[in-house]
Image (spheres, grey):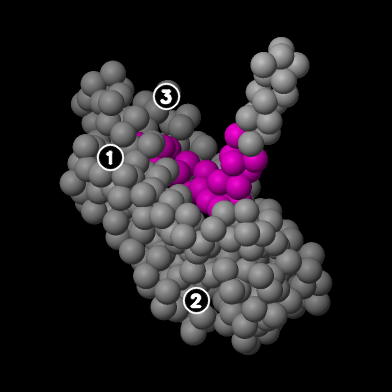
Amino acid sequence: MSFSTECEMEKQNVRSFKGLLTELKFLTKGKVLIANVFPIVATFFIALSFSSVTFLEVWDSFIYMIIGSTLVVAGALIFNNWYEVDLDVKMERTQQRPTVTGNLSMSTVLMLGILATIIGHAILFFTSLEAFAYAFIGWFTYVVLYTFWTKRRYTLNTVIGSLSGAVTPLIGWAVIDPAYHIVPIVLFILLFLWQIPHTFAIAMRRHDDYKAAGVPMLPVVYGFDMTKRQNAVYVACLLPLPFFLISLGTPFVIITTILNVIWLVYSIRGVFRNDDKKYADTVFFYSLFYMWIVFGMMLVVPMFA
């Protein structure tokens, strides 16, 4: 075999590997995967600052947590893609998913979902039984209660889906200590409330997609005005939560409260305006900014504890 032939084969292997990574990124909804694992990591370090142990004492649990939780979340997202392929073929934003393009067979996708779920839970079992239990609750809620049951039937699907993502702070905390503590409980509530206006904004931005696929998202069934009113209510519910997190420091409470007030003012103003597209885009990007700032601060807090 000539040197040029070997080089060409090596290039093909690299392209194949990159292609596989791309398919996995679309299959696991890459950004969604990261957004779910990030609160787990942030809350782990907050829990560490409240405990008497050092990172060096639990570094192995941290590795198990990262790998296990990533696989569990990925498994849930893969199951979602596998089950919703008939919806995804009708939606513009999901055309690159391998279940739609056919780049991965449905049996392969199903097997990946099963393996990621089983291996992820098995790895999390080495952290704590409580963290394992929260991860399973999140997986079960997202796959069974959200994907298989409510998404195609009820506008309540957003609330159910939000419960699954809200367990992530409980997982991170439970790796260090039992999660019946005010901080992880309030963070659970905060993340639950945050996800609803965030998801409503996505549903407004992709209204035509969801309508074409027959998914009963709130803006599709009841319109934008109802969605904006509900958004304002859920954002208002965030207002008192920072004051229950005073143990994270006054700067955290002040910054989070300011973020809440800005979001609420914009949400209320949006109810009386007719700029639905601008409103949906702004709420979507602001909600992402909000989440990264709030949980990002939790990575900084332990440094000054």
Q: Tell me if residue 236 comes above or below residue 241 in the rendering.
A: below
Q: Residue at x 49, y 84 (%)?
A: 153
What residue type is disc 3 on?
Answer: Phe
108 lies left or right of 197: left
Magenta residues span: 17-44
Residue at image position (54%, 70%) is: 84
Image x and y of residue 256, in percent? 53, 47
Label placed on residue 123: 1
Label 2, label 3: how many angstroms apart (C-alpha)? 43 Å
Q: Which mark is residue 134?
A: none
Determine which residue is flagged by label 3.
304
Contact? badges 2 and 3 (CB < 8 Å): no
- Residue 181 visible (yes or no): no
Q: Residue 151, which numbered label?
A: 2
Magenta stretch, overall SS: helix
Depth check, front residue: 5 or 260: 5
